[in-house]
């Protein structure tokens, strides 16, 4: 059986992410799969965070890409979209991960 090990959970609420991790673990059990702690990373996309006693740097690699956000001023910021668009104070960058670039 092949592992289904490539997925990302994104939420601004750490509690939601932890609930999802538990729910996904329970969902995988009946088919004989599990979340591997050594391959699981909880981080923020914009700033470093402390999690499980260590500092997690911002951003993450997924399917050969690095996803990260950077703070920017009001003239370069992203917007929420829609009729009542508002500035969000950061830009999201998606670029090839260092590991993917090294393999080219």
Image (cartoon, grey):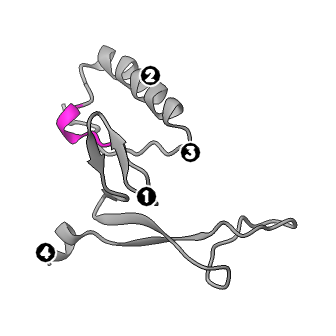
| Cα separation between marks 3 and 1 | 12 Å
Between 41 and 7, the one lying in front of the other is 41
Which residue is denoted by mark 1 in the rendering?
47
| Cα separation between marks 4 and 3 | 31 Å
Instruction: Name which residue lies at 51% across and 30% down.
Output: 15
| 83 displayed left or right of 76 | right
Instruction: Name which residue lies at 38% across and 17% down.
Output: 26
Q: Earlier in the sequence, mark 1 or mark 4?
A: 1
Which residue is denoted by mark 3 in the rendering?
12
The answer to if 40 sits in the magenta stretch is: yes
Q: Earlier in the sequence, mark 2 or mark 3?
A: 3
Q: Quadrant of residue 27?
A: top left
Q: Quadrant of the N terminus?
A: top left
| Cα separation between marks 2 and 3 | 18 Å
Instruction: Name which residue lies at 66% across and 66% down.
Output: 88
Between 33 and 70, the one lying in front of the other is 70
Q: Quadrant of residue 25?
A: top left
- Residue 68 image point, x, y percent: 42, 65
Which residue is denoted by mark 2 in the rendering?
23
| Cα separation between marks 1 and 2 | 26 Å
Q: Earlier in the sequence, mark 3 or mark 1?
A: 3
Which residue is denoted by mark 4 in the rendering?
102
Between 34 and 78, the one lying in front of the other is 78
Q: Nearer the viewer, mark 1 or mark 4?
A: 1
Q: Earlier in the sequence, mark 2 or mark 4?
A: 2
Extent of the magenta region = 36-41
Instruction: Name which residue lies at 34% across and 43% down.
Output: 50
Q: Secondary structure at mark 3?
A: loop
């Amino acid at each position: 059986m092949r592992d289904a090990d490539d997925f990302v959970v994104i939420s601004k609420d750490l509690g939601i992410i932890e609930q999802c991790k538990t729910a996904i673990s329970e969902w995988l059990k009946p088919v004989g799969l599990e979340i591997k702690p050594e391959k699981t990373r909880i981080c923020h996309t914009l700033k470093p965070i402390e999690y499980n006693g260590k500092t997690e740097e911002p951003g993450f690699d997924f399917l050969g890409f690095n996803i990260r956000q950077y703070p920017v001023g009001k003239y370069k910021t992203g917007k929420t979209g829609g009729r009542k668009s508002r500035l969000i104070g950061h830009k999201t960058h998606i670029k090839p991960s260092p590991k993917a670039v090294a393999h080219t």
